[in-house]
Image (tube, rainbow, N blue to C red):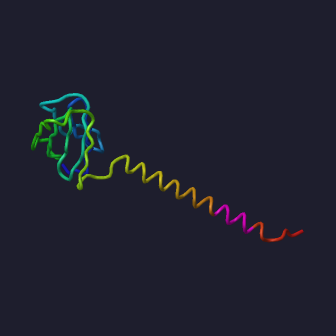
Amino acid sequence: MNLNDLVFTGFNNRVAALNRNTGAIVWRWAAPSGSTYTSLLLDGDRLIVSVQGYMFALDAASGRQLWANEMKGFGFGIASLASVRGGATSSTLLTSAAAADQEATADQEATADQEATAVSTFPAIT
């Protein structure tokens, strides 16, 4: 299956790939170590998974585990994941949307100011 046809979700040390059009589960995977919150990063053709201090790489198309790293000495919690191959995150998209909204509001205010100035510079016709 093409990666463009998949969406990924993680819950309680489990990961699933869903068909983006039907919602059907295409594959599922359970972490052999760790539990609780699962962080995901789609890194090109790999899905990077963090589960309570453990890191895993899965083949994004099949769910096959490619590697595991215990991350000794790092502790555990909610992981922050980043990659040059990873796509835009929801926070990046939200920030971009907020910036676009601010720009549109500024443009509207500038247009309103220009219209008000134009009206005030011409004498009223009586």
Closer to us: 44 or 20: 44
Q: Residue at x 17, y 38 (%)?
A: 27
Closer to us: 26 or 76: 76
Q: Which residue is drawn at 26% across and 31% down?
A: 37
Q: In this view, does 70 lie above or below 3?
A: above
Residue 72: horizontal and vertical position, in percent?
Answer: 13, 36
Q: Residue at x 86, y 70 (%)?
A: 125
Q: Is residue 125 above or below residue 109?
A: below
Residue 56: horizontal and vertical position, in percent?
Answer: 15, 40
Residue 103 is left or right of residue 119, and the answer is left
Closer to us: 117 or 71: 71
Residue 108: quarter of image: bottom right
Q: Is the magenta stretch mostly helix, strand or loop?
A: helix
Residue 1: horizontal and vertical position, in percent?
Answer: 18, 48
Magenta stretch bounds: 111-118
Q: Which residue is drawn at 14% across and 43% down?
A: 58
Residue 69: quarter of image: top left
Q: In this view, does 117 lie above or below 104?
A: below
Q: Is residue 77 above or below residue 86?
A: above
